[in-house]
Each structure stands twice: as C-alpha cells, then as structure tokens.
Amino acid sequence: MKKTIYLSIISLCFSSLVFAQEFEVGDNVVSAHIGIGSSFGVGGSESIGLSLNYEHGLWDVGDDVVSLGGYLGLKTFNFNGAIDGKLTYTIIGARGAYHFNSLNIDNVDIYGGAMISFNNVSFSGQGSNFSSALGATIFAGARYYFSDNLAASVEVGYGVAFLNLGVALKL
C-alpha cells in the first residue's frame, strides 16, 4: 500500500513536467520570428527578417491535424552602387500546415506546409526594376513547449528569410 502511495505521489510530481503538446483542432497559435537569409538574391546590406503568423487547427487526419492561418513578413535591403536606394519587401500570405502529432514527441510540435502570398516590393531610389508579385512557398518547422502555452520556435523555408527563430504562444 505504501509503495502505491509513493508511486502515485512521484507520478503526480513528474507529470507536471511533461507537456504533451499536440496541435489539436481548435488550437490557435501566434508565432513571432526573426530570420536570416533571403530568396531575394539582390546583394546590398539586408536587415533581419521579421515575421508574424497565426494558425488555427481545423481538422483531424488520424492523430495529425491540419491548420490554416495567415503570415506577415518584412525585410529591407540597402544599396549603394549601380543600384542606389532602399528596397522594402513585405509578404502577406495564407498558410496551411500539417502537424505530425503521430510522431508522439513530448513537448514538440513538428509541422510542414505551404503558403500562397502577395509579395509587395517597394523601392525608393534609382536604378531598380524590382516588382511585386504573387508567390507560393513551402516551409517546415518545430516548436518546443516550455509550458502549456509558450514555445521556442524554429522554421525553415521561403518567406522573408530562410531560417527563422522565435517564440510561439498558444492562445
């Protein structure tokens, strides 16, 4: 009997340390990232990329979940030379992601997906032929949850940056 009581107390103490962070239908997550690298191979000095995205869990696929949401990203480039001026690159997009809950890794949400977007390019200066366009991109990422609602986040893919690090908040 004492053994059962001790095991129960130990289980309760350690269960608070494990956050089974599956992304579920109905979940809402907001992520903010800073990023490096760019698909805009234009030279010049570039700022870090800043991005904000939101996603909502819509439907189950077995143990896994599909989410939809939005994306906003911003990056700037400064040029001195043949092209002289400042380029501002803004992405506004809609994203869909597939969350691999079936991998069953404690505290981790692993996902991949695609985004369609409007890539707005504005240039102040001389010598530019940059233009805005529609875009389609892919991405993959992971979140490590420190608590039920707060996670560190990493994402790779095409957006305002190739590699993005940040935080995520489950609302």
Image (cartoon, grey):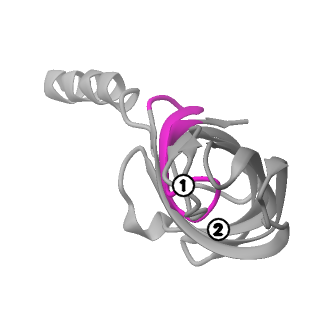
Q: Which mark is residue 75?
A: none
Q: Amino acid at mark 1?
A: Gly
Image position of 130 with respect to 70: above or below: below
User: Which portion, as a residue range, is magenta?
Assistant: 146-167
Residue furthest front as drawn: 82
**Residue 34 x/y as whole percent:** 56, 38
Residue that appears at 64% across and 55% down? 82
Side (left or right) of 19 relative to 46:
left
Q: Which of the 4 quarters of the picture holds residue 160?
A: bottom right
- Is residue 28 something one can see in this rendering? no
**Pointer 2 residue:** 97
Q: Secondary structure at mark 1?
A: loop
Side (left or right) of 56 relative to 75:
right
Quarter in which the N terminus is drawn:
top left
Quarter in which the C terminus is drawn:
top right
Which residue occupies the foreground of this view, 160 or 60?
Answer: 160
Mark 1 or 2, nearer chain start? 1
Look at the image and say whether residue 130 sits in the magenta stretch.
no
Residue that appears at 53% across and 36% down? 166
Which residue occupies the foreground of this view, 143 or 89?
Answer: 89
**Residue 128 x/y as whole percent:** 78, 60
**Pointer 1 residue:** 43
- Is residue 129 something one can see in this rendering? yes
Q: Amino acid at mark 2?
A: Ala
Residue that appears at 57% across and 64% down? 39
Which residue occupies the foreground of this view, 81 or 102?
Answer: 81
Image position of 130 with respect to 107: above or below: below
Q: Secondary structure at mark 2?
A: strand
**Residue 22 x/y as whole percent:** 53, 54
